[in-house]
Image (spheres, rainbow, N blue to C red):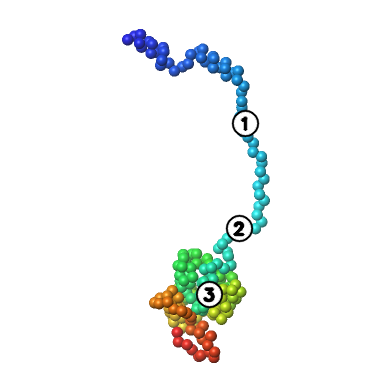
Amino acid sequence: MTSASNALLTGVSDPTPALDEMRETLSTASNEPTQVTLPQRIPAQGRPPGMGTPRRDPRDEVLVPLDVLGLVLLGRFGCMTGPQLRFEGYGGCKESNFARRLARWVARGWVCLMRFLGMGCNLVWLTQKGADALVDGGFATADQLFPRTRVVAAKDLAHHLYIVDLCLLALRGIPRAYQSVEPAIALQRRLQPQPEAIPD
């Protein structure tokens, strides 16, 4: 029992190498040439010159396809509410997104707007400058658009917006598909001589 334990202590379980083995390892390591790996230097690369033109922002485009659709509808019906224009021209996008586009239209003088009774929804109408932009761009002809200088009179506003709602539904094919949907003012302009009035 005692001899086995002494053998275990002096032999197999000792993790330290013998002194002779350590001397041999040091002597062979000193004879080999030392190789030092230095980090490779990358040649300096100049940065490209700065661009003189500002970055293009698609939100600042003069006319985007949805703008064309909304402005043409506005020119056909003369006056629309903000929600009518947002849902029909922009597919019911967020109000903040539509408000940014509407602000650009107003800044360019293409449309005018006012709050209904100072606190309701926006009433929007196309100006002559907006009609000229659509005609110059080839998006509509002058006889298709009805620019205005002011909003629809208060006594006619409810009737006018009701007709716009019906026209927008008819353009979607509700209750059935129609060959042509036009406001009465377009038909009145086309007839010669012009009748005094055409019922909606």
Which amino acid, mark 3?
Val
Contact flag, marks 1 and 2 (Cβ < 8 Å) = no
Q: Secondary structure at mark 3?
A: helix
Q: Quadrant of the N terminus?
A: top left
Return the x and y of residue 67 as percentages of the image width and height: 53, 69
Q: Secondary structure at mark 1?
A: loop
Q: Residue furthest top?
A: 3
Q: Residue furthest left?
A: 1
Q: Residue at x 49, y 89 (%)?
A: 197
The residue under label 1 is 38
The span from disc 3 to disc 2 (Cα, nearest Å) is 30 Å
Residue 10 visible to the viewer: yes
The residue under label 3 is 72
The span from disc 1 to disc 2 (Cα, nearest Å) is 43 Å
Q: Residue at x 64, y 36 (%)?
A: 41
Label 2, residues with CA under 10 Å away: few <14, some 14-19, many ≥20: few
Which amino acid, mark 2?
Arg
Q: Residue at x 38, y 13 (%)?
A: 8
Q: Secondary structure at mark 2?
A: loop
Tell me if residue 7 comes above or below residue 63 in the rendering: above
Residue 168 visible to the viewer: no
Q: Quadrant of the C terminus?
A: bottom left
The residue under label 2 is 55
Which residue occupies the foreground of this view, 28 or 156? 28
Contact flag, marks 3 and 1 (Cβ < 8 Å) = no
Label 1, residues with CA under 10 Å away: few <14, some 14-19, many ≥20: few
Is tag 1's residue or tag 2's residue first in the polypeptide sequence? 1
Return the x and y of residue 165 as percentages of the image width and height: 43, 77
